[in-house]
Amino acid sequence: MTAATEPTTTRRRPTDAAADDETRLNKETSRSVRRRSMRLLGDLLRPHKKALAWAAVLVVASTLGVVAGPWLVAEAIDRAVPALRDGSATPLVLIGAGYLVAAVLGGVAAGAYIRAAARIAQAVLLDLRRRVFRQTQRLSLEFHESYTSGRIISRQTSDLEALRELLDGGLTGVVSSLLLMLFTFVSLLLIDWRSGLVLAVAFVPAWLLTRWFQRMSQRFYREQRTASARLIVKFVETMTGMRAVQAFRREPTTEADYRTLGEDYRDANLQIFGVNGRFQPGLILIGNMTVVAALAVGGWRVLDGTLAVGALAAVLLYCKRFFQPVQQLGMFYNSFQSATAALEKVSGLLSEEPTVTEPAHPTPLPLADGGRARGELRLDHVRFRYGDGPVVLPDLDLTIPAGQTVAVVGTTGAGKSTVAKLVTRFYDASEGAVRLDGVDVRDLASADLRRAVVMVTQEAYLFSGSVRENIALGRPDATQEEIEAAARAVGAHEFVLGMPDGYDTDVNKRGGRVSAGQRQLLSFARAFLADPAVLVLDEATSSLDMPGERLVQRGLQTLLADRTAIIIAHRLSTVAIADRVLVMEHGRIVEDGSPAELIAGDGRYARLHAAWRDSLV
Ligand SMILES: Nc1ncnc2c1ncn2[C@@H]1O[C@H](COP(=O)(O)OP(=O)(O)OP(=O)(O)O)[C@@H](O)[C@H]1O
């Protein structure tokens, strides 16, 4: 027995992605969430090391170009103008030319920096988009049953959009702003360190204000993201459940819910603007007061003769410029905050691990003649619960010989669909094992398992595309003849030919719409083409009209021939074609026999069958 076949317990663990709805995370979680998103960021940037280095060179060059300006002004006033007065124009010409060169080079470097940064940003976004999509497909059904599709959609849309906004402009701005502040401060110290001190003092309240802003906006941005995700979830839920909404006249309730969520979203946004409204004017005030202080101190020192006029002009220009990027930083901080929150959520989704894992060393499935598995199923003392919920299957012990058609019936919630999900390995047994031809399904490569066991679900999902593509999903390399043969076998060929473009009809376009029964026949054709050894059919509860039902019934019989089948049956007409019936109750099999045997007895199935027969009369 390998490690994978040891009885494992499925626990409901606090998932990484589940934490993303908590607006106020505790310190520990907050730190680990930040570490997780930084790791992701590092991962995303690693392939772009060279391009990043080049972008860094460019941004430094462009900032130097900007910072050189006031210094050249000081030189012009303090040296070139007196030289001009003495009859020499050379220094002024040289400084003028220097200014021009600095401006041109700075401009060229700034342009190249923006382009280089954009290339990196777009590559990172594409990578992230792919990762999110791949991950959502990789995660097990357990995850998808708890993480609503609306939340997945908001990861792929609004969260990636927030990151795009940051990467598209914000981040480039933040880097050049920070650099500009640093270089401005250093230049100021070099020109006149005492004026540098004035700026350093002014920086303290600016820094405190920024910290306050950071704390508040982080909280409000999280609230905003959560509110926006809830809004999307509600919208998607209402749209996908539109039939139920209208059938039960839920419109006023859903509208009221939606309005409340919309108001929450508006409030979250207003809070952000409230914080912004204090931060930005606060910074402008600090900036202007610094200029006044520098002017007072500098003016007095010019009178004193300890500071040149040109140097004072440069000091004032630097002081003014120093707070411009701080303001810019404040603005960028918004997109930075929402992008950080988005990155936290995306990284949460990406760090989820599938609960159903691929074995490290898969066991090959023994194949019978014709290259197909035999299809013997064994549920070996299977015990199962969803997460840490109540036990759904206490101890299921069952062998289904290859080729047998088994119908599973029972009261609602008895665990029938759960058996289907275990056999198809959408979930793993909490204890015990499910074996296919003697091999534990946990030891099978998922490609082998999916080839051998195919599930046809109730909703018989059709993807956008042609009828042909939808059938070929069962075996993408199938030829047109094979596709038609499959359709003919299950009785779908005639109605497909009757469609506007036959097999090329788009199932989502007008005229390509198919009825519930036809939809099922198409999914039968798909399964027939896939030709699995084991077929699991979760039958639709809605009963079709009689002619439709007979058609589906005939298609089903062809599909079932020559393979093992488990049918979660809701119609007793389906049960009649089974070799064996299992009646389930509270996760246990309470009756097991051929339909004829059970009808002849006086058990639950006999009563159910009698009631059904009476209803037909
Ligand atoms: N994803 C899930 N998470 C938690 N509990 C679940 C989940 N799916 C089903 N259950 C629970 O497991 C039990 C068995 O459900 P299951 O869907 O297997 O019943 P069923 O016999 O197929 O019912 P029905 O005839 O109504 O489809 C039920 O009590 C149900 O509430």
Image (tube, rainbow, N blue to C red):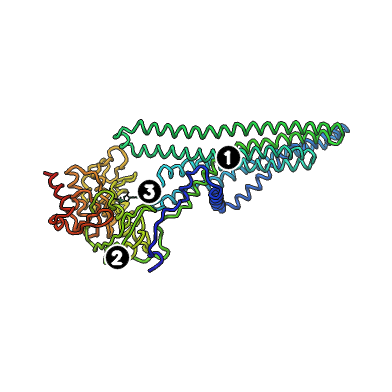
Determine the image quadrant of residue 617: top left
Kindly state the secondary structure of the residue where label 1 is placed: helix
Q: Residue tagged by mark 1?
A: 169
Is label 3 within 8 A of ligand 1 (CB to nearest ligand atom)?
A: yes
Query: Which residue occupies the foreground of this view, 250 or 168?
Result: 250
The answer to whether the residue labelled 2 contacts the one labelled 1, judged by CB atoms less than 8 Å apart, is: no
- Nearer to us: label 2 or label 1: 2
Q: Is mark 1 within 8 Å of ligand 1?
A: no
Give the residue displayed 26% in from the left and 67% down from the top.
Answer: 369
Left or right: 4 in relation to 494: right
Say which label, 3 or 1, has the lower sequence index.
3
The reply to whether residue 127 is in sight is no
For the point 41% across and 66% down, the residue is: 3
Circle 3 residues within 10 Å: few <14, some 14–19, many ≥20: few
Q: Is residue 212 left or right of residue 182?
A: left
Identify the mark nearer the N-term, 2 or 1.
Answer: 1
Give the amino acid type for the residue marked by disc 2 in the picture.
Answer: Asp
Residue identifier under label 2: 437
Whether tag 3 and tag 1 are in contact, CB under 8 A, the answer is no
Does residue 251 appear in this view? yes
As drawn, is 103 to the left or to the right of 451?
Answer: right
- What residue is disc 3 on? 145
Please, what is the three-letter code of the amino acid marked with disc 3?
Glu
Q: CA distance from mark 3 to mark 1?
A: 37 Å
Question: Horizontal and vertical percent for residue 135?
Answer: 44, 51
Residue 103 place in picture, x, y as percent? 70, 38
Which label's residue is closer to the chain start, 3 or 2? 3
- Residue 238 appears in which quarter of the rendering? top left
Give the residue furthest to the bottom: 1
Task: Indicate whether 245 appears above or below 541.
Answer: above
